Image (cartoon, rainbow, N blue to C red):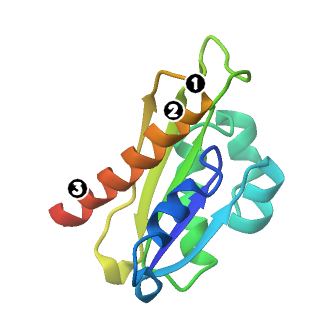
C-alpha cells in the first residue's frame, strides 16, 4: 500500500495516482497538509523542525513522509513541500524550490531518502513538475530496491 503527503502540490500527486484504473488496490490515502498546523497535527511534523529548517526543507519533507506512514496502513510514502509562487520565495529559497522525501516501513526494505529541486515557470508549471518528479523518482527508487 502507498500513501502521499502533499503541501505545494495540493493533492495533484494523489489525483494522478487515482486516475489510474485499479489504483484502489494499492493507493491507501493521501494527506494534503498545506499549512504548518496541518503538517504538525496530521503528520506529526515537529514544530522545532519547521522553525529550524523551514516548512520547505528536506527535514520537514522527511517527517511528512514518515508521518504519513505512521498515520496510515501503507508501507511506502512520498512527501512534497515547496514554494510554487508567485509569492513566498526568498533569496535562500526562491519560488520553485521544492523538497521531496520517500520512506518505507521495515517490511518494504525502502530506505528514507530526500532531495530538493528548483523548478522554473509559473505556479501551475512548478506544481506539475514537482508531481511528475516525485512520482518518477519513486519509480526509480522502487526499481532499485
The residue singled out by tag 3 in the image is: 140
Pick out the residue farthest to the right: 37
Q: Under tag 3, what secondary structure?
A: helix
Residue 70's place in the image compared with 15, above or below, is below
Which of discs 1 and 3 lies nearer the camera? The answer is 1
Pick out the residue farthest to the top: 91
Q: Residue at x 43, y 31 (%)?
A: 117
Nearest the viewer among 49 and 57 is 57
Q: Residue at x 61, y 58 (%)?
A: 11
> Dot 1, how many residues are within 10 Å of its Cα: few (below 14), some (14-19), or many (20+)?
few
* Residue 142: x %, y % from top left: 25, 65
* Residue 98: x %, y % from top left: 52, 35
The residue singled out by tag 2 in the image is: 125
Locate residue 136 relative to residue 125 in the image: left or right.
Answer: left
Q: Distance from label 1 to label 3 (Cα)?
A: 27 Å
Which of discs 3 and 2 lies nearer the camera? The answer is 2
The residue singled out by tag 1 in the image is: 122
Q: Could you tell which of marks 3 and 2 lies nearer the N-terminus?
A: 2
* Residue 102: x %, y % from top left: 42, 58
Q: Residue at x 27, y 60 (%)?
A: 139
Q: Which mark is residue 108?
A: none
Task: State the quadrant of the C terminus.
Answer: bottom left
Q: Under tag 1, what secondary structure?
A: loop
Total marks shown come to 3
Task: State the quadrant of the N terminus.
Answer: bottom left
* Residue 41: x %, y % from top left: 80, 64
Q: Are marks 1 and 2 in contact (CB under 8 Å)?
A: yes
Q: Residue at x 47, y 61 (%)?
A: 16
Locate residue 111 relative to residue 101 in the image: left or right.
Answer: left
Q: Could you tell which of marks 1 and 3 lies nearer the N-terminus?
A: 1
Amino acid at each position: 500500500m502507498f500513501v502521499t503527503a502533499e503541501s505545494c502540490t495540493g493533492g495533484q500527486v494523489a489525483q494522478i495516482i487515482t486516475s489510474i484504473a485499479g489504483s484502489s488496490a494499492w493507493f491507501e490515502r493521501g494527506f494534503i497538509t498545506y499549512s504548518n498546523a496541518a503538517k504538525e497535527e496530521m503528520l506529526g511534523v515537529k514544530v522545532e523542525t519547521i522553525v529550524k529548517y523551514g516548512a520547505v526543507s528536506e527535514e520537514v519533507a522527511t517527517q511528512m513522509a514518515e508521518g504519513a506512514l505512521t498515520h496510515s496502513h501503507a508501507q511506502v510514502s512520498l512527501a512534497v513541500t515547496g514554494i510554487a509562487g508567485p509569492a513566498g520565495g526568498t533569496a535562500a529559497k526562491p519560488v520553485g524550490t521544492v523538497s521531496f522525501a520517500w520512506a518505507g516501513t521495515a517490511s518494504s526494505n525502502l530506505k528514507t531518502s530526500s532531495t530538493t529541486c528548483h523548478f522554473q515557470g509559473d505556479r501551475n508549471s512548478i506544481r506539475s513538475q514537482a508531481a511528475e518528479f516525485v512520482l518518477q523518482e519513486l519509480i526509480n527508487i522502487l526499481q532499485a530496491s
